Image (cartoon, coloured by chain):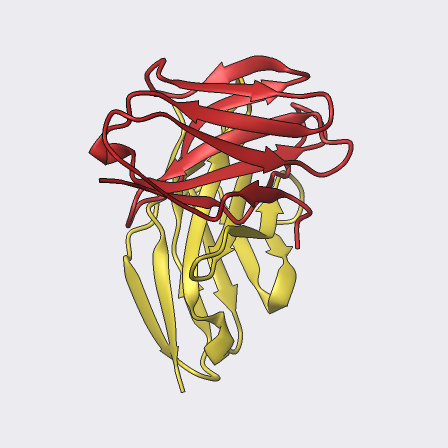
Chain colours: A red, B yellow
Amino acid sequence: ETGVTQSPTHLIKTRGQQVTLRCSSQSGHNTVSWYQQALGQGPQFIFQYYREEENGRGNFPPRFSGLQFPNYSSELNVNALELDDSALYLCASNLEASGVEQFFGPGTRLTVL
Amino acid sequence: AQSVAQPEDQVNVAEGNPLTVKCTYSVSGNPYLFWYVQYPNRGLQFLLKYITGDNLVKGSYGFEAEFNKSQTSFHLKKPSALVSDSALYFCAVRALTGANNLFFGTGTRLTVIP
């Protein structure tokens, strides 16, 4: 086990709705990254937070947003859900932004109908 | 730009035989390379990484990988496959700038046949 937890495990939403996914990092890990893994694909980087500030972003629209809190937890928010947002969402934490190894949570499976 | 390619969607191997899962990379500069494994309905589990040093990297569960700079490859290997090794394997390279995020390949499904 990596010590990274995510909730909920599964989620079903309808198109146009908003969703919040949560992640709890390993204690002391001040960096969290979020990835989207569509069916049959490798994970794709959404963004990273370091000490509660966005530290980098992949090729995702602004309706994907995040927050990181001082207690090593974080959120991924997606507005105006689209069918293509259906995927496994993974968070990963590391000790510092420069840290080499990322520790992944089990993921949240989001289905958009 | 960084990227990795996993040329095989599926690899089948008999239990007890050696296995190889292939990965090639494209990066300007020295690469940080990783292998992760994913079991059904689970997140990614770290297997091993190459940063610098010995080209043969040993990792978890008896896996190892060989870094080959001239062929820009980082193939995952195991001398004797187990049925429990059946899973989805991802090769990844770390971004050299910005958030140091990982760029993943499309994955290779390994099936070990009893």
* B5 with respect to B67 (left or right): left
Quarter residue B75 falls in: bottom left
* A92 with respect to A46 (left or right): right
List x then y, in percent, for residue B92. Answer: 46, 41
Q: Quadrant of the C terminus of chain A?
A: top left
Q: Residue furthest right?
A: A28
Residue at 56% in and 15% down: A55
Residue A79, compared with residue B41, is above or below; it is: above
- The answer to whether any part of residue B29 appears in the image is no
* B80 with respect to B89 (left or right): right
Quarter residue B114 falls in: bottom left
Closer to the camera in the image, A83 or B80 = A83
Closer to the camera in the image, B104 or A87 = A87
Residue at 62% in and 54% down: B57
Residue B103, compared with residue B105, is above or below; it is: above
Residue at 61% in and 68% down: B62
Residue A65, compared with residue B33, is above or below; it is: above
List x then y, in percent, for residue B59. Answer: 63, 58
List x then y, in percent, for residue A90. Answer: 48, 40
- The answer to whether any part of residue A26 appears in the image is yes
